[in-house]
Image (cartoon, rainbow, N blue to C red):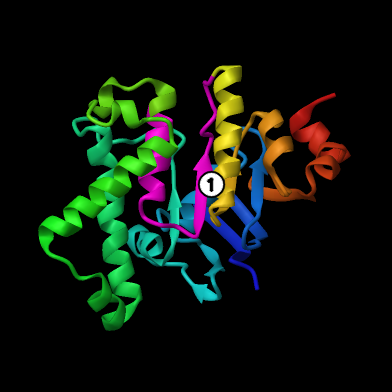
Amino acid sequence: MYLLEGHQITKRFGGLVALNKVDFFIKPGEILGLIGPNGAGKTTLFNVITGVYTPSSGTILFREIPISGLKPHQICQLGISRTYQLVRPFPSLTALQNVLVGIYFGQDKRSTWHGEEGKGKEEKTGGGRKKDAEQEALELLDFLGLSHKAHTLARNLTMMERKRLEIARALGTHPQLLLLDEVMAGLTPSEISSTISLIRQIRERGITICLIEHIMKAIMELSDRVVVLHHGEKIAEGTPEEVTHDPGVIAAYLGE
């Protein structure tokens, strides 16, 4: 069984076809790389998966459940979380408070999707729940290397710190599938290496990952499989080695 699968996904904006009959799947526990030139439709695909856009045609299934047409918060509650190409922390909240937003939403999700039995097991006093959430947020910040910035306003963090804060907030919702949109763009080589290590650790925690990335070092080192988009169409799929030696991919994206 695939964790996520899309069949003939098409997205039109007026006369512009941003995605054209794209088929894809993601296996549980794998890291899938999504590459292609700017404007290829990568972020549009993320937006369709997460409910920002409704596909013009086609079907997306998450754990065999149709999710096309659901709202973003409903899809997140099912277990899909994401980061954004342009980071979107809450600038006037601290790093800790940003992560708490994800955790409180995740707690609501667990109560909703585990039914009354799960709700009864997790029910606590308001103070106890807040204490547990804050502890979890601090642990996530520590995992992301941000524990020393817990009480810093998000607007005062560096680019790398804001990118990591977005990952921490996304992990706070307890996703089964994490979509990462260019989390290494603009980082230094040492920051890229540490982020590659971090993504491996996230996968080791049992979270499936799909990442959009232009940094081929990261794609080659992380991806189990790679899907290549060009002009809204899938032009190649395979292992990193297979894709980087594909003549169509070389001509459309990698260059000689």
The quarter in which the C terminus is drawn is: top right
* Coordinates of residue 17 in the picture (x, y in percent): 57, 50
Which of the 4 image quadrants contains residue 109?
bottom left
Image side of residue 126 versus residue 234, left or right: left
* Coordinates of residue 45 in the picture (x, y in percent): 54, 51
Q: Nearer the viewer, residue 136 or 182?
A: 136
Image side of residue 212 versus residue 141, left or right: right
Which of the 4 image quadrants contains residue 142?
top left
Q: Report helix, strand or loop for mark 1.
A: helix
* Coordinates of residue 147 in the picture (x, y in percent): 34, 31
Does 256 sit above or below residue 175?
above
Does 114 sit above or below residue 78?
below
Q: Nearer the viewer, residue 8 or 34?
A: 34
Q: Nearer the viewer, residue 191 or 249?
A: 191
Give the residue at mark 1: 202
Q: Nearer the viewer, residue 4 or 39?
A: 4
Q: Badge 1: how crowded within 10 Å, few (<14), some, or many (20+)?
A: some
Residue 16 visible here:
no
